[in-house]
Image (spheres, rainbow, N blue to C red):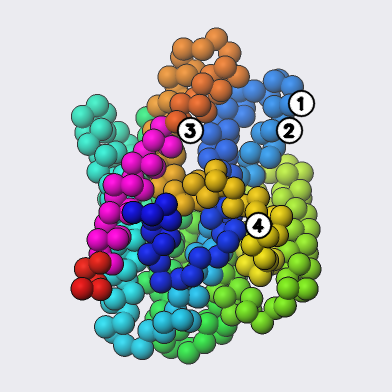
Amino acid sequence: MSSLGIRASSSLSYIPGLDGIRAIAVIAVMLRHYTSPFTPLLNDAGWGWKAYAAIANLGWVGVDIFFVLSGYLIAKMLLNNPIQSLDGYLKFVNRRVWRLIPAYVACLLVFSLIAMMFTPNSKVLNNALSLWTMTSNIQSAFIHRTALMDGQYNLVHFWSLAVEWHFYLLLPVLLWIFRSVYLTAIILIAVAIATRYLFQQLDLSDNAIYSFTLCRMDALAMGCLLATVAPKITQKYADLYLVAGAVLFVSIMYTISQATIPYKKLPWMQLYGYTLIGLSVAMMLVGIIKASVKNRLVMLLERPFMLMTGRASYSLYIWHLVFFPFIANVALDRYDTSLEAFIAAFMMAVSLAALMSALSYKFVESKFYLAHRREARS
């Protein structure tokens, strides 16, 4: 198997820089999840820690980056290969299943086996049905927001995988109805904002507004818009899009960092903030997609470490948080200071995530997906 692995076998042409963007997204999410539990314990650690924590705790935006990227790539795939029949839809879903579900299921099997052996009364294990049915975002939105986290395990991050899966099932149907990627994207953005507004008026939880499927369709739809608009933008204007998108993105992040309440509870964030983030990411991606392979930014994104991390980003995302509560608690018990505990937990968690994601990518993702593609071609 080549170093490109799954990327080399994809029906989409490789776009330089996007693996680097994936790497940035997954690293941002990992920093957020590994830092936030220690933030209250290290308030007195000095300005260096506060500066780091302020940036790391904005890492949740990595999920929005993933959403825009996913929307772009799936829309591009469907533009190149339109689905015109039920058989075509089923083949599309089947490809998505073979690409995404094996690694997802492998993680759940390992988690379930370990939990049943060592912590059979785990809250996460007892609430795992939503994980197996790809509805964990609905559970966290309306039923129990912390059902998938306890002192040993944390699978709360699977909510975004559920949202993406719902999008993959829904988008081809909407494209068949509206016959336009552009129109479908506009409708999904409008639906997302309208749904969040409705949830605000109903005084539903901030987690419902954050994680319910319809509430997050706008970021994915921004990726769809990108797929329709990017081919029409010249290189000259692409650079302007990148700069304007970066300015908008940084402005949003700075405003959030200065708020006195969590970002999920900000009224403007709940209503249109997620849409603006998706827009800013899509604008920046215009510059990446249209850039030359010799562009300095693209060359930086294509560095070996970035490529390796980006190509393993799906498995990294799946595995990075599962056992972190246990690791963090062990570190806090064994080290004298919270800072030492954080450093130890961070290093152990990154090492475990890297190991498990490498194994998953090599022996699960690549094997299942490539085997399926060979079978489909035979």
Q: Which residue is mark 1?
A: 47
Q: Which residues are magenta?
A: 352-373
Which is more foreground, mark 1 or mark 4? 4
In the image, residue 219 above or below residue 57? below
Q: Earlier in the sequence, mark 2 or mark 4?
A: 2
Which residue is labeled 3 in the image? Answer: 350
Amino acid type at circle 3 is Val
Res 282 visible: no
Instruction: Indicate whether residue 359 is drawn in magenta.
Output: yes
- Please tell me which residue lies in front, 197 or 223: 223
Above/below status of 333 relative to 220: above
Whether residues under marks 2 and 1 lie with C-beta atoms below 8 angstroms apart, the answer is yes
> Within the image, what quadrant is residue 322 found in?
top left
Crowd class of label 2 (few under 14; some 14 to 19; many from 20; radius 10 Å) = few
User: The N terminus lies in which quarter of the figure?
Assistant: bottom left
- Classify mark 1: residues with Cα within 10 Å, few (<14), some (14-19) or many (20+): few
Pinpoint residue 145: horizontal percent, then vertical percent. 44, 46
Give the amino acid at mark 4. Val
Mark 1 or mark 3: whose residue is earlier in sequence = 1
Numbered circle sitting on residue 51: 2
Amino acid residing under circle 1: Trp
